[in-house]
Image (cartoon, rainbow, N blue to C red):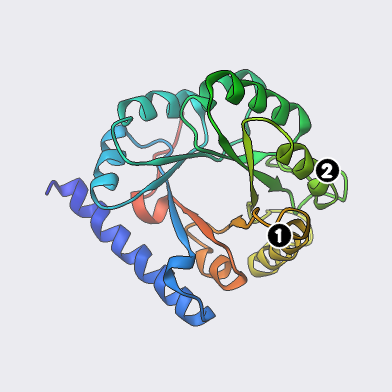
Amino acid sequence: MTDRKEELAGNLAKVEQRITAACAAAGRAREEVTLIVVTKTYPASDVRALSELGVRHVAENRDQDAAPKAAACSDLPLSWHFVGQLQTNKVRSVVGYADVVQSVDRSRLVTALSKEAERVGREVGCLIQVALDAGESARGERGGVAPGGIAELADLVAGAPGLRLGGLMTVAPLTGEYAGRQRAAFDRLMDLSTDLRRAHPAANMVSAGMSADLEQAVAAGATHVRVGTAVLGVRPRLG
């Protein structure tokens, strides 16, 4: 095993221990929570090593980095999640490799994703990104639709050819009433998920929590946690 693979194996084991302990504390089964490793800024060789270590879900937030990486790893049994703000001019590329787009936050994006998914004959899972730093009808600082806009957007995704409504995603906000209150933010997301599932029972995926706050997300009921730094290490500064 290479030094890098050993490092990744050790980090993965620590994250696994954290998730297992968080599940036990919350009275949940470990298999209720799926780990998604956020591989942004790291090379395809790391993705390959993670796959060999048993990782099955990876996430990227920039198409220009993700597309070549996904192509280089196309032989691996991986599900690719796109978690960044997505411009419509990148939809064609992203639909080529992403199994799930976690950052759906506006009707124009739904239309573009549906058109492309239909064109290439793929089904793409979609999560509605919820902005908990927005008012009832505004957009969030880091993308996302306000809670008041979830139902309309969810109905649009559910009725769009080539798309599958998976559930909700959020990023713990840096501003507003939930700033510094991750557990409260994740509890709010779970309440919104309960509301969504009344109309769309199969949309039961809740993606929340990252390296610093995965325990709070698991305690609230998240089904998926997105962990980057705790597995791959501190990212080098860009620029």
Image position of 154 (left or right of 68):
right
Residue 218 or residue 76, whichever sits in front: 76
Q: Which mark is residue 193?
A: 1
Q: Which residue is mark 2?
A: 152
Residue 220 or residue 237, whichever sits in front: 220
For badge 2, the amino acid type reads: Glu
Residue 77 or residue 72, whichever sits in front: 77
Q: Which mark is residue 121?
A: none
* Badge 2 element: helix
Which of the marked residues, 1 or 2, is nearer the chain's N terminus?
2
Residue depicted at x 80% and y 52%: 147
Image position of 8 (left or right of 35):
left
Tell me how far mark 1 sits from mark 2, CA to CA: 14 Å
- Check if mark 1's residue and mark 2's residue have beta carbons within 8 Å: no
Position of residue 209 relative to residue 45, above or below, is: below
Mark 1, Cα crowd under 10 Å, few <14 / some 14-19 / many 20+, is: many
When asked about the image quadrant of residue 194, the answer is bottom right
For badge 1, the amino acid type reads: Ser
